[in-house]
Image: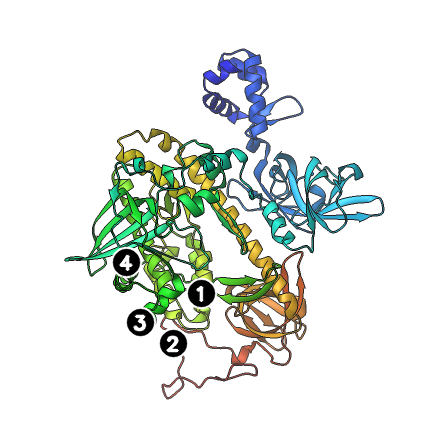
Amino acid sequence: MRKMETQGWTQWKEQIESLLEQGPQRAEPIAQALQVPQDEVLPVLEAMVEEGRLVKTRKERYARPETLGMIRGRLQGNARGFGFVVPESGEEDLFIPPDRMGGALHGDTVFARMTNAERREGEIARVLTHANDVVVGTFEQEGDATYVVPDEKRISMDVYVSRSDRAGARPDDKVVVRITQWPSRGRNPRGRVIENLGNKDDIGTDIKSLIRQHRLDEEFPQNVLGAAALLPDAVQEEDLAGRRDLRRLNTFTIDGRTAKDFDDAVSIEDIPSGWRLGVHIADVSHYVTDGSPLDREAFKRATSVYLLDRVLPMLPEALSNGLCSLNPDVDRLTFTCTMDIDPAGRVLSYDIYPSVIHSHARLVYEDVTRLLETGEEAGFAPEVARDLRRMEKLAQVLTEARMERGALDLDIDEAVITLDERGVPTSIEREERGIANRMIEEFMLKANECVAEFARLHEIPILYRVHEDPDPEKIQTFDAFLVNLGYRIRGSAKGKVHPKALQAVLDKAKGKPEEGLVSRLMLRSLQKARYCPQPLGHFGLAAPDYCHFTSPIRRYPDLFVHRALHLYFAGKSTARLRKRAEEYAQHCSEKERQAMEAERDVDDLKKAQYMLDHVGEACEGVISSVTSFGLFVELPNTVEGLIHISALDDDYYTFVEKSYMLLGERKKKIYRLGDPIRVVVTAVDMSTRRVDFAVDDEKESGYTEEAKPVPRDADGKTGKKNKKGKKPPKRRTKGENKS
């Protein structure tokens, strides 16, 4: 096997795949074609079978999966036992009935075989890799049978646990169970309890269960904590070599009131051509060196995860809240991007370099916003208040310049969920983003653009933050929806669109009831941003170059960028980083998605828990989605719930997909995407985190077909006039808002 490895396994595998294009073959003719002994080829063939690149038939022949009609993909399970295989090739999903699942579970990578092409139905032929070697769930007992009901409802099978493997678990305990025997036809998986998280009703058990379910790390390994403990408590004199000393510069941080890790500080100076903006970022790479225990753990985590009442940091607290954090009144090592910007928002020049700063103040967003809105300077040093006003003016100029070039301003409201000491939600409100928040965001965007451009021009290998052009079909679908609201995306022929055209839609919707809905649906129509070694541009920002440089305490890609810059300035080779960039980009993108899913699940959990105390109450909402099985309604506090089609019992409703509405067959009542609606909270299912609504009978919702609003054109006009050339008066139906 060593001999084969030295000759290059990749090349051998490619040659074998080429040989098998004509059809299945035994090992002997494959070895003859490669001109090597058969016993040297067999390990390679078996390895390719394990990887899923080949299939081994019952007649000991090796074949490429596609020649045998195999479809490789990821299984998406369903609580009712069936599933869908999402092909890696991008083909349409394949439906798998419950009796054809072949022992596969949600998330598994599988080979599927088509059994009915017309209905696109199939069966699982083989599980390549299992996604769930551990499962989080609730321990239950019925008679002598003990089992775990998975929290992940798409895993439709309970996991049986013998009495000897229950590790003291009792009914209603949340546990982590390791699979010891995979399921097969007619047989559930078996496992043993490896961790008891406590009773499902205990304080903190709910969030801890989600942490385990998403496979997030709570504790740092001892060797990582030991490496952090060996670092100094403060900046040392020898650390200053090769750095610009900016300690006399009026520099400060602006963050949330509860923040403890400060990645970025800012400074500003007036210059003849405009302003000199300084963005100073914690130089984490000085302490977290390439390949060290701290670095390996940071890469493994790739991002900090924020879960309402706790943070799962990328770095140990000694660094994230201490040595690397830009705390006030102490020296800190930084990477600085200084930008000279003119009154039109153009960057005339920029300079990027290692530095040392001394933050003069730790400011809070709300306090800065109050100063800039009211002029109240209490609690601010005069020079700090002066610089904040300069920054406000510069931020306005930068925002205007960014919007002029066509960047999107997708201001999606997020929820602020407040928990008490027991972890019970006491309030849910929409987050307010003040002047200070937007100002700092604008400065970080500009620094990220400059660093990305510098890296591209000097061929420095970094991880770019890319946002590719949207899928034309999704844009066409979104445009069709907008017609129902009286908007159009101008210049979107065949689905190709410039971000400026999308921003024009956002501008028209601003301040109207449908503003939030338009923003969210537009976001769903765009590609997801990701990390990439190539500078593919950022559609949403209308920026040719963009990267993440400003948050190395909580994001690994930023740390990677800092490390590459250090090597470049030191005149050292960046070949090792270049070689790993693709792998690192993919890993960091995956970990980011994992963190976002965990954060969303925790938010949904606490939103559902909050609504438990509001069952029976009536609320105003907006229809946020229309499906064949009902309406999703979003409340002003961002909580979303479902009115199931069965709850619309005053008529038989048909789903009109192109118009995003449900239409009553007899009364012609319409429930349409974006319409206001009054609902009653009828039920909350904590196991699925689902909130159920019903239409409030006290205040009937929905339009009749005769009285529905007339669709408007792209300028918001109905295009419909009466005989005298005037628009017809608006007709109201029962339930419309008369204000």
Q: Amino acid at mark 1?
A: Val
Relative vertical location of residue 85 with respect to residue 433 in this rendering, above or below:
above
Q: Position of residue 290 (x, y in %)?
A: 40, 32
Q: Amino acid at mark 2?
A: Lys
Q: Which residue is mark 3?
A: 375
Query: What numbered label is drawn on residue 717?
Result: 2
Relative vertical location of residue 544 with respect to residue 193 in this rendering, above or below:
below
The furthest residue to the bottom: 724
Q: Earlier in the sequence, mark 4 or mark 3?
A: 3
In front: label 4 or label 3: 3
Q: Position of residue 480 (x, y in %)?
A: 45, 63
> Spatial distance from mark 1 to mark 3, Cα to Cα?
35 Å
Instruction: Say which of 147 and 280 sits in front.
Output: 280
Q: Which residue is mark 4?
A: 405
Q: Do the numbered discs 1 and 4 sit on residues whose CB atoms are within 8 Å?
A: no
Q: Earlier in the sequence, mark 2 or mark 1?
A: 1
Q: Position of residue 632 (x, y in %)?
A: 57, 65
Q: Which residue is mark 1?
A: 518
Relative vertical location of residue 64 with respect to residue 419 in this rendering, above or below:
above
Q: Amino acid at mark 4?
A: Arg
In front: label 2 or label 3: 3
Q: Earlier in the sequence, mark 1 or mark 4?
A: 4
> Spatial distance from mark 2 to mark 3, Cα to Cα?
42 Å
Residue at coordinates 43% horizontally, 43% vertically from top-left? 319
Q: Secondary structure at mark 1?
A: helix
Residue at coordinates 60% horizontally, 80% vertically from top-left? 699
Q: Earlier in the sequence, mark 4 or mark 2?
A: 4
